[in-house]
Image: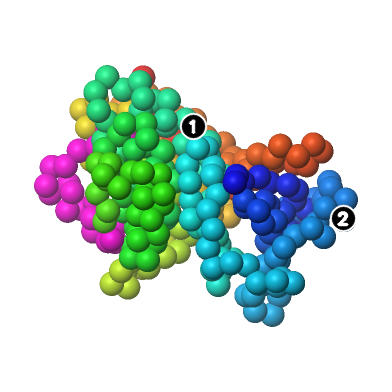
Amino acid sequence: MSYQLIDSGNGQKLEQFGPFIIARPAAQAVWLPQQKEDVWKKAHANFTRDGSNRWISALPLPPLWTVEVENIAFKISPTDFGHLGIFPEQQMFWRWMTDILQNAPSKPSLLNLFAYSGGVTLAAAKAGAEVCHLDASKPMVAWARENAALNNLDNAPIRWIVDDVSKFLAREQRRSKKYDAIVLDPPSFGRGPNGEVFKIEEQIIPLLTQCRALLSEKPLFIALSCHTPGFTPYIIKKLMEQAMHGLKGTVESGELLLETQQKGSYPLPSGTYAWWCHG
């Protein structure tokens, strides 16, 4: 069973995750819904932040099920924060990098930072890359490993790391470790496994500097996605241009759009991206 964005509006998005239709908050959906009210009433569950975070449904959702996105299977499980274990807007990253990795002259190595449930990791492994998957959350790394098993990638060349990103990058630099490609999706605010504090406005520049230092002699790309209000495509493009100054290549930026196949419905902006590609 697959995923689709059905509609958005009035501060919500209506999505189908396999057999279940779910409505969740989407602050950026300030427009009016394009589908009729009857379509929205088909939702099996609604997550609300009014008063307190909670799921509202006529019948309880199952604790877990699976969906397929871009030919990758994911375990879906409702969380207390309204997340389900996948950020579908990342599909454009998977498609873009898959083409580059598959056409690399030799087996590429990829570092996936703030890796969550492993969409980038699995897409890269399927494209033939060796992957280092890093997240500060031990449960999320375990979730990503379950997703790898769902995709018959148990024995793929993937390193699974639970660590603070900055500390890990510093150790990799001391070890003279190099990567052909790096993907990062930093939060606005986060904590490492030992309580380390991450604030994107304070750490994005040193983070990109660390990433550049780990690039191989013939790098393929660095790709950054961001969900922090105020970090516009222009801003993160300039951050990437500064970080990659002096290296031959091009930088592109834009909005992460969650596409919809539903006639009349709008794509939903779900963050920004900037990527540098060698060339």
Task: Identify the residue at horizontal 30%, vertical 34% (top origin).
Answer: 129
Q: Residue furthest bottom?
A: 51
Q: Residues within 10 Å of mark 2 (few under 14, many from 20)?
A: few
**Can you give x and y, in whole percent of width and height, for residue 118 in the image?**
40, 49
Does residue 37 appear left or right of residue 243 in this picture? Answer: right
Identify the mark at residue 38; answer none if there is no mark: 2
Q: Is 196 or 52 nearer to us in this picture?
A: 52
SS at mark 1? helix
Residue type at mark 1?
Arg
Which comes before the other along the chain, label 2 or label 1?
A: 2
Q: Is residue 167 magenta?
A: yes
Cα–Cα span, label 2 and label 1: 34 Å
Q: Position of residue 125 (x, y in %)?
A: 34, 38
Viewed as shown, does residue 116 lie left or right of 47? Answer: left
Q: Quadrant of residue 217?
A: top left
Write the start and end of the magenta stretch as one range.
Answer: 162-182
Instruction: Determine whether the residue tagged by mark 2 lies in a helix, strand or loop.
Output: helix
Foreground mark, 2 or 1, reads: 2
Q: Which of the two residues, 88 or 25, is positioned nearer the viewer here?
A: 88
- 267 sits left or right of 81 in the view: right
